[in-house]
Amino acid sequence: MRVAVVGATGYQGGATARLLVERGHPVHTLSRRPEADRPDLPGVSFGSGDLGRYEDVRQLFEGATHAAVVMPLVYQAEKVMRYAQHLAKAAREAGVRRLVYNTNTRVPDRTTTIAAFETRRLAETVLREGLTGSGVELVVVRPPVYLDNLFSPWNGPALVNEGVLAYPLPADTPAAWLSHRDLAEAVYAALTVDGIAGRIFDIGGASSLTGPELAEEVARGLGRPVRYTALEPGLFEQGLSPILGGESASGVTGIYHYMASGAEPGLLGGDDGSTAASLSVKPAPVAEWVAQLPWHLWAHAEL
């Protein structure tokens, strides 16, 4: 495959790009960042440009046989719609065989007021309509919540130094926590497995865990006690804003406000690996994932 990866400068797209390169597939991506400010992605070729300019997107898709797409943390409907229109048109004109769209979140069945859900639903609709009858296959992957969020400046120090796992999900909400690496495996499978054109996969981890159950698994991986604390979404947003910017932080946090409302408590849950198995993906158990990471980096670190 020759793969156009949209979002390779982010965590999710970056994990996909690395896995593709690791398995010998040429990867091309697009970035607005200056060359010195781009992440280290050996084997990935960069083009300068913006999803809002069709000419840049068309250049990205030139020569591509496949595409893996995750939208940036943008939650303005008009902008996301334009991005999706450009991606669909470029995929058609380039003759891409299959496009895999990672929504970067689950999407409720019913319409909500949450921009993080509705802009991703909009992009999926625009891609599906834009690719219908074109010969370009569309596969959609909808992940839940990421384990990698725990190995972060806003979670790592408290976990290591205080044994506290504070996260903005109610303690009794089940979530099929998934690592970026296992998400990349799912996207790779969605790019390559035959007979899945048009399908939507609510991918998830090996099992669904409530907050206290997640803490038990993390404790097992760390080899020390850990307790779960449900963080108020507003406080989470305050901590995220300096990192992502106010607009993006507000968009991301909308998901957690929705989950805190109790409107759909099972949205982030899983099916005990059945969907992953249909893609021949075997997500790592949480404790195993935790045990492989250098948590000592957060020892005595401060936010």
Image: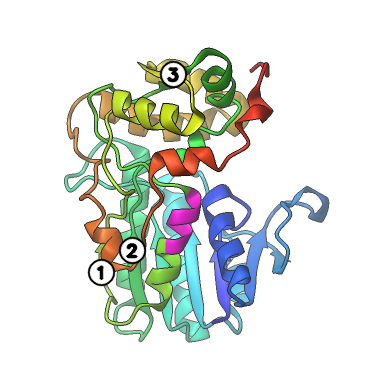
* Residue of label 2: 140
- Horizontally, residue 98 falls left or right of residue 111, namely right
Question: Mark 1, mark 3: which one is toward the viewer?
Answer: 3
Can I make out residue 219 in this image?
Answer: yes
Residue 182 on the magenta segment:
yes
In this picture, residue 296 sits left or right of residue 144: right
- Which structural element holds mark 3? loop
CA separation, marks 3 and 2? 38 Å
Amino acid residing under circle 1 = Arg
Q: Amino acid at mark 3?
A: Pro
**Which image quadrant is residue 128 in?**
bottom left
Residue 110 placement (x, y as % from top left): 16, 45
Q: Is residue 262 above or below residue 184?
A: above
Q: Residue furthest top?
A: 162
For the point 18% across and 35% down, the residue is: 264
To which residue does mark 3 refer?
Answer: 225
Reply above or below: 208 against 150: below
| The N terminus: image quadrant | bottom right
Write the start and end of the magenta stretch as one range.
Answer: 180-185
Residue 243: x %, y % from top left? 61, 30
